[in-house]
Image (tube, helix red, strand yellow):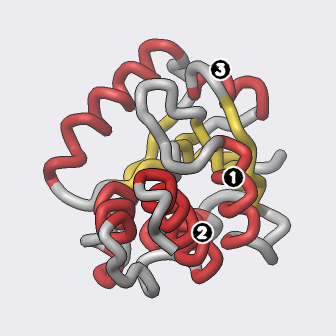
Amino acid sequence: MKRTAIYAGTFDPLTRGHEDLVRRSLEYVDRLIVAVATGASKQPIFDIDERVSMIRDALAGDARIEVRAFTGLAVEFAREVGARLFIRGLRAVSDFEYEYQMALMNRHLAPDLETVFMVPSLDTTYISASMVREVARFGGDVEGLVHPSIAAALRKRFAERAAALDPGTP
């Protein structure tokens, strides 16, 4: 029986920190589903299809990784795909409270599912999707923080937004 885990998030955008956790997770599971949440409570800069496509591109090459969109409760999605484990990342103490509460709620909803917390590698600890978006929004260099195709998509998206706000801009 394959050990299947879910690494869920909005991934707007997928960062090198996310990639690090995905790749290291594969040392403990046979199959990892990167579950891309629609982000109903957030306002993502990329729609769900764009995020799924970018993540597939960035993580291409390992048949053990599957990228799928989902809506609703992660525990229901886990049951649907036969996963028994959630992978969650903890960058800092500030992440712990939210992640701990979510893990306990998931345990309440699905006692047969377990959550494993992983810390990022030292060189990716400071990277967050929100910081990457902020840097990209103001034209900063996001190379090294995200996959090159995602860096290009960020540049394009924010250039489109700037042009929409100021149609006179070339």
Frontmost of labels 3 and 2 is 2
Q: Mark 1 touching mark 2, by CB under 8 A?
A: yes
Q: Position of residue 123 (x, y in %)?
A: 32, 84
**Of label 1 and label 3, which has the lower sequence position?**
1
Q: Is residue 135 above or below residue 73?
A: below
The residue that appears at 23% across and 47% down in the rendered structure is 95
Residue bearing the label numbered 1? 50
Which residue in the rendered view is the most extreme toward the left? 93
Q: Is residue 119 visible?
A: no
Mark 2 is on which residue type? Ala
Badge 1: residue crowd in 10 Å (few <14, some 14–19, many ≥20): some
Q: Position of residue 69 (x, y in %)?
A: 70, 39
The tag on residue 76 is: 3
**Of label 3 and label 2, which has the lower sequence position?**
3
Badge 2: residue crowd in 10 Å (few <14, some 14–19, many ≥20): some
Label 1 – label 2 distance at C-alpha: 9 Å
Frontmost of labels 1 and 3 is 1
The foreground one among 159 and 146 is 159
Residue bearing the label numbered 2? 153
Judged from the image, the secondary structure of the residue bearing numbered disc 2 is helix
The foreground one among 54 and 78 is 54
Q: Position of residue 130 (x, y in %)?
A: 33, 55
Mark 3 is on which residue type? Glu
Badge 3: residue crowd in 10 Å (few <14, some 14–19, many ≥20): some
Q: Position of residue 145 (x, y in %)?
A: 42, 78
**Of label 1 and label 2, which has the lower sequence position?**
1
User: Based on the displayed image, in which of its 4 quarters is residue 99 positioned?
Assistant: top left
Q: Is residue 33 above or below residue 39?
A: below
Mark 1 is on which residue type? Glu
The foreground one among 122 and 156 is 156
The residue that appears at 53% across and 76% down in the rendered structure is 151
